[in-house]
C-alpha cells in the first residue's frame, strides 16, 4: 500500500470547506459532511467497545462492522456511489439471529448496563440510532442508497442483542427496567 496521507496538514480546509470523495468541495457544515462525521463517531464508539476483552465470536464480526462503517463513510463522501449492499444486510441479520438464539426470550424492557462491555454495546446502539436518523434525513434531501439506512437499522439491532449477550457471557443477566407506580392522588 502506498502512502495515502503523507501530508496531514494541508490548509485546504482553512476557509471552512472540505473535499468530498469525488473531488468537489463543500462547506464543512453541510449535511453530507455532518453525516460522514456521525458515521466516524459511530465507528470510533465501536472502537472503544473493541478495546474491551471480548469473546472472539463477538470481536471478529465487530471488526468487520468497523470496516463496513469505514466503507459507508466513503460511500457517503461520493454522491451516487454505493459500497453497502444486500449481502451486508443479510450478514447482520444472520448475526442477530445467531446471537439471539442463545438468549432467553425478552419479557421485560431492559436498561443499558450490566458489564462495562454490555453498556458500551448499548452506547454503540444508541449512537447508531442517531446516525440512522441523520442518514434518513440526508436521504430525504439528496440521493443516497437505501442499503445505508438498512445497514444502520440492522446494526443497532445487533448491538442490542450483543449487549444482552455480553451480560450473559459474564454471568449476569439483563438489567431490567422497573416501572414506577404513579403516586397516589391525595
Image (cartoon, helix red, strand yellow):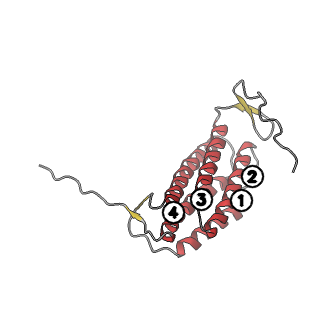
Identify the mark nearer the N-term, 3 or 2: 2
Q: Residues within 10 Å of mark 1 (few under 14, many from 20)?
A: some
Q: Which mark is residue 131?
A: none
CA distance separating discs 3 and 1: 14 Å
Label for residue 163? 4
* Comes first in the chain, label 2 or label 4: 2
Q: Which residue is mark 2?
A: 82
Image quadrant where residue 107 sits: bottom left
| First reached walking from the N terminus: tag 4 or tag 1 | 1
Q: Position of residue 24 (x, y in %)?
A: 78, 34
Q: Position of residue 11 (x, y in %)?
A: 76, 27
* Percent position of residue 153, x then y: 58, 57
Mark 3 vs 1, N-terminal side? 1
Q: Residue at x 48, y 66 (%)?
A: 167
Please provide percent x and percent y for residue 162: 54, 64
**Distance CA(mark 2)–CA(mark 1):** 8 Å
Whether residues under marks 4 and 1 lie with C-beta atoms below 8 angstroms apart, the answer is: no
Whether residue 117 sits left or right of residue 66 in the image: it is left
The residue that appears at 15% across and 50% down in the rendered structure is 185
How far apart marks 3 and 2 lie (CA) works out to 18 Å
Say which residue label 3 marks: 155
Residue at which label 1 appears: 85
Amino acid at each position: 500500500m502506498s502512502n495515502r496521507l503523507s501530508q496531514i496538514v494541508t490548509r485546504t480546509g482553512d476557509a471552512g470547506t472540505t473535499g468530498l470523495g469525488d473531488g468537489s468541495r463543500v462547506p464543512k457544515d453541510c449535511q453530507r459532511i455532518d453525516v460522514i462525521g456521525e458515521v466516524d463517531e459511530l465507528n470510533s464508539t465501536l472502537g472503544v467497545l473493541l478495546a474491551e476483552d471480548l469473546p472472539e465470536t463477538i470481536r471478529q464480526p465487530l471488526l468487520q462492522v468497523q470496516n463496513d462503517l469505514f466503507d459507508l463513510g466513503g460511500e457517503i463522501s461520493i454522491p451516487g456511489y454505493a459500497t453497502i449492499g444486500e449481502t451486508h444486510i443479510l450478514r447482520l441479520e444472520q448475526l442477530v439471529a445467531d446471537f439471539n438464539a442463545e438468549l432467553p426470550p425478552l419479557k421485560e424492557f431492559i436498561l443499558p448496563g450490566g458489564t462495562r462491555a454490555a453498556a458500551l454495546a448499548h452506547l454503540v446502539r444508541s449512537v447508531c440510532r442517531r446516525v440512522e436518523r441523520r442518514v434518513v434525513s440526508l436521504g430525504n434531501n439528496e440521493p443516497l442508497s437505501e442499503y445505508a439506512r438498512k445497514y444502520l437499522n440492522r446494526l443497532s439491532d445487533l448491538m442490542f442483542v450483543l449487549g444482552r449477550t455480553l451480560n450473559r457471557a459474564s454471568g449476569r443477566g439483563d438489567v431490567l427496567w422497573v416501572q414506577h407506580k404513579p403516586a397516589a392522588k391525595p
